[in-house]
Image (cartoon, helix red, strand yellow):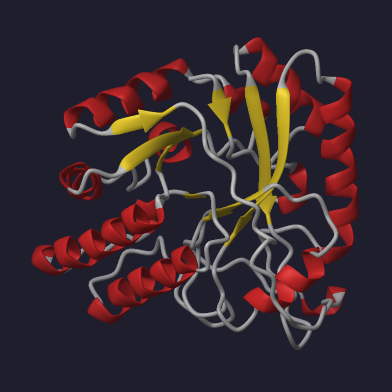
Amino acid sequence: MTANYHTHTARCRHAVGDDRAYVERAIQGGLQVLGFSDHAPYPFPGGYRSDFRMEMGELEGYVSSVLDLKREYRDDIRIHLGLEVEYYPALFPQLLRALEGLPIEYFLLGQHYLGNEQGAPYSGAATADPAVLKGYCDQVIAGIETGCYTYLAHPDLIHFCGDEALYDSELRRLCRAANRRGLPLEINFLGLWQGRHYPDERFWRIAGQEGCRAIFGCDAHDPLRLWDPPALDRARALAARWGLAVLDRAALRDPLAPGAAGAKAGPTEKNRAPARKGATV
């Protein structure tokens, strides 16, 4: 593994360490490419503030920091500037507009919530509700179809405990959509080392059968997680088990090329939403 595109910063409020520490750990671990992809600062309406992403006012500092590190370490490692972005249909055009003119190189699609987040189900909460499963797959597929995303992060985040035949048919539909657009699917190291419900063997069996391409992602919220040999060994074994081709590098897609219209919005401190029980990203 010589590249990782899934790296967070302390701005998201659930990661630790300064930006430089992530770069130095990546170099120490032998990475040749490091992509920063912190949780995007969505412009929610009505003063709502998400509790697991940077503020819109922190975006400039994030961009400046990554670009400074890119210049400073250019002889040691290639650094890319990205964001992890849910596809929230009512808000996505406004987000694209808010990012216009910034040198964002890529988006990762990590669908943590359904709907537009506010009052919607968390994708990783255990559920047997077919509507939640179908809603997750519908929304991820709609995000894929925008053409804005480089790859699908933790595609198996959906924690469905209901009918297995329905799980198979819905996630197979998602895998086929990813294949149509040429999007790799991430085997997520955070889930591996924390013992979460993902990576989900059911999903990766389907992905292997559908001929999907995989990519490894550290999902690092701590510099130490950028070099995790046990997680890497388990990810390789999973990929081999289901016959998955694993890409070492991602072909970055310019997320702002499609363009969008919308107004920029900003939240207020008193309206920050509290963390929802069971929601971990």
Q: Is residue 74 above or below residue 115?
A: above
Q: Residue at x 83, y 65 (%)?
A: 56
Image location (x, y in percent) of residue 220: 59, 35
Between 256 and 265, the one nearer to me in the picture = 256
Please indicate, yes or no, whether residue 18 appears anywhere in the rendered image: no
In the image as oriented, which residue stretches furthest toward the bottom?
Answer: 46
Which percent across, then down, holds residue 100?
81, 65
Give me the residue at 64% from left, 58% from top.
255
Comparing 164 with 17, the one in front is: 164
Rendering coords of residue 42 (x, y %): 71, 69
- Residue 127 in the figure: left or right of residue 67: left
Q: Is residue 95 above or below residue 151?
A: below
Residue 278 shown left or right of residue 18 in the figure: left
Q: Is residue 5 visible?
A: yes
* Identity of the residue drawn at 68% across and 19% down: 25
For the point 82% across and 20% down, which residue is it?
A: 73
